[in-house]
Image: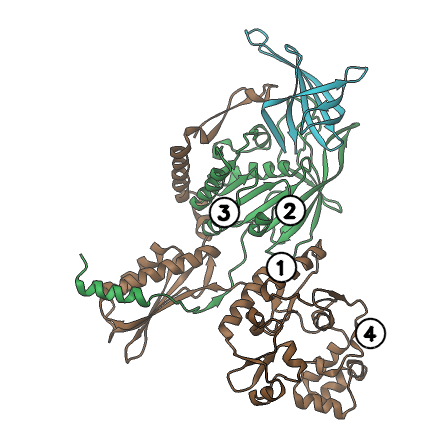
Chain colours: A green, B cyan, C brown
Amino acid sequence: MPTEKLQHAIGAIHVRFGGHALVQAARLPAALPWPTGLPAVDRLSGIGGLPRGRVSVLQGALGSGKLTLALAMLARATREHTHAVVIDRRRRFDPWIPDRLGADLDALTVVRPPTAAAAGEAAVALARAGAGFGLVLEELPEPALAPLESAAARSGSLVLVVAGGEQRALAHASSLTLELERVGWVPDRGRHVGPLSVVRCVKNKLAAPGAEAELALRYPLGPRLPAAEWPREVEREPAVVELWSDESAAG
Amino acid sequence: MTELLDPPQPVEVELDDTGRPRQVRGAPFTGPARVVQRWIVEVDWWTSEPVAHECWLVVLREQLMCVIYRDRAGGTWYVERVYD
Amino acid sequence: MIPHLELSRRPELIGRPAVVDDGDGRVLTASEEAAAAGVRQGHTLRQAEALCPPAALVGADPVATSRLAERIAAELSEHAPAVEVRLDGRAWLDLTGIPLPGRAIAGARRGLRAAAGVEPRLGLAPGPFAASLAAARARPGRLLQVEDVPAFLSPLPVAELDLSAEQLERLDLLGLRTLGAVAALGPRQLESQLGRAGRTAARLARGEEPLPLTPWRPLIVTGVRCQLEPPVEDREALLFVARRLCGDLAEKLGASGAGGRKVRVRLGVDGGAPEARESVVRHPLSSTQELFGLVSSWLREWRPAAPITEVTIEVPELEAAGRRQLRLWMGGDGSAEEVRAALERLQDRHGTEVALSVRRALDTSPLAGQRYRLVPA
């Protein structure tokens, strides 16, 4: 029980408290990179991967291939982290794709919040707790974004948000935004099997933006798919990446 | 990449002369369809709840690849999967 | 380009003649309206008053102005990764490599307009020197783009070069009155006349842009200080203050994802020399508990010579706090517990179905719905 004298002293401090001086200023070291396993994509950030402890955004129109790319990254993340989380409010996440891409399903938790606000809170809570990789499958409400940024910075969590269009608040919170645009189709024996998309780095807090890569994404088509190997890159200008190495996509 | 619609969304599908889907109606999937692939799924036929789907992989509006199917039992068409 | 930040941060001065006192009885800067009456930087306040009697006189506040510069820089860096902001109201964005420069320019314009309350003047050129001269010549809210830099620079007066009054006089004596003339003379000759500054001046005049931007980096608070009035002798009170400071510092570090392994505590002692203690620990500290854990152990043993007038807690060398997580990922995961706990809390709130694990069911089934089962984690 504090003595009266102490109370008084604390009271006096209360009154005069405040006004911190900026004692020193320093530059925060750069974010550590997380290699995605797709060198063409890793090059886009300028640091050799997605930034740990930061929010990154994959955006593009429906059909641009952004979700494919995100799930490929998720699959790798499950093999490297104890906890990889997917925030799937719309309940459309299909574990089949990451599984086909070699994911460690034991490391994966699918979070299905009932509302958008709950999705925001869940993302922040899991980033704060230090979940190694968090994939958010839709836009989060604005109030969650700044806390998400600091939670990720504090714990080193890598947060990847998949967004349909450009959202101003999300753009602000993002350290790296990659935009996908489908520019054609990938043909295979007379059939179109996936989008040919350009990935552009449109925002980059880590290095100069503006880098591009071309990705040939093959969707898993038909009812069955043989096990896929991890993505293999085809080196040519511009860099083309095939996410699927299997030749027969027919069921 | 692929979003699984669960439950699948019912849509109306117009066929061409050869029986292939030509047009889909049902927002947000309304538009002309170009067929890429077709297959049949028949499972659990020995149970009381057999599943028989006639599946089509189509490109809608030259933009969006998706899987639609016709439930052979009821004849209704659905969008099952959207590729992104 | 917007008015000098001492003016920009005072919206009540927009459109009025105003003069900023640099604290030494001289004019630091004058608003456009006062400048039109002839007031210049360096004039005494008396001269300024004589030239422009209705001018409002305001004192410079470098701290507040620096804060405004920080805010502007933070806003501009949303549009381009390399920005520089100066107190005189000039700001630069490096648009190299930006895929949509028009958008960046529009964003910068919005940001500057919001900061200054007036339309900024914008200049676009291959380098910073030409760009700022272009901006100075643009109309408010408009962009002046320079493509042929030497042609643009040539007729401009030598006063645009950052030279002292004597150096400018020297140029005048040499008959060099325009940038074109300086450019024609060349760096070698100018260096022999004016030294290094002359060399740089000639290169600038030629459009060579020898001076790159000094890109802004956000300031991270690395220390907090509290002054105690009256001075404190009571150890419990001191611990109370230290705990508050640790909390504030942790919040600021946390927001940037920073931490540090070196911690320093400095106590200002009434009538005596300050006492300090510092130590380097194994992994970066960043939370209140971590910082206070260390600081409080020192304070409990400390016997300062006299009552304490000031407490400073610093983390002078920053590292990414998340580094610690890396080691945890390799095995014996401490954060796994926290994530599990976070998932459990979500389940308590929203039901067990909110967090699910993936189990393989009939994973070769052609029916997508049959391949996996999602069960509560």
Q: Do tag 1 and tag 3 residues touch (Cβ < 8 Å)?
A: no
Q: Which mark is residue C81?
A: 1
Dot 2: chain letter: A
Which residue is under mark 3? A143
At x 66%, y 34%, the residue is B84
Identify which residue, A3 or A44, lies in the foreground. Answer: A3
SS assignment at label 2: strand
Q: Amino acid at mark 1?
A: Pro
At x 51%, y 21%, the residue is C361
Which residue is under mark 2? A178
Q: Amino acid at mark 3?
A: Pro
Dot 1: chain letter: C
Q: Earlier in the sequence, mark 2 or mark 3?
A: 3
Task: Give the Cα separation between the discs numbered 2 and 4.
Answer: 39 Å
Dot 4: chain letter: C
Q: Which mark is residue C151?
A: 4
Residue A134 horizontal/vertical position (percent): 51, 41
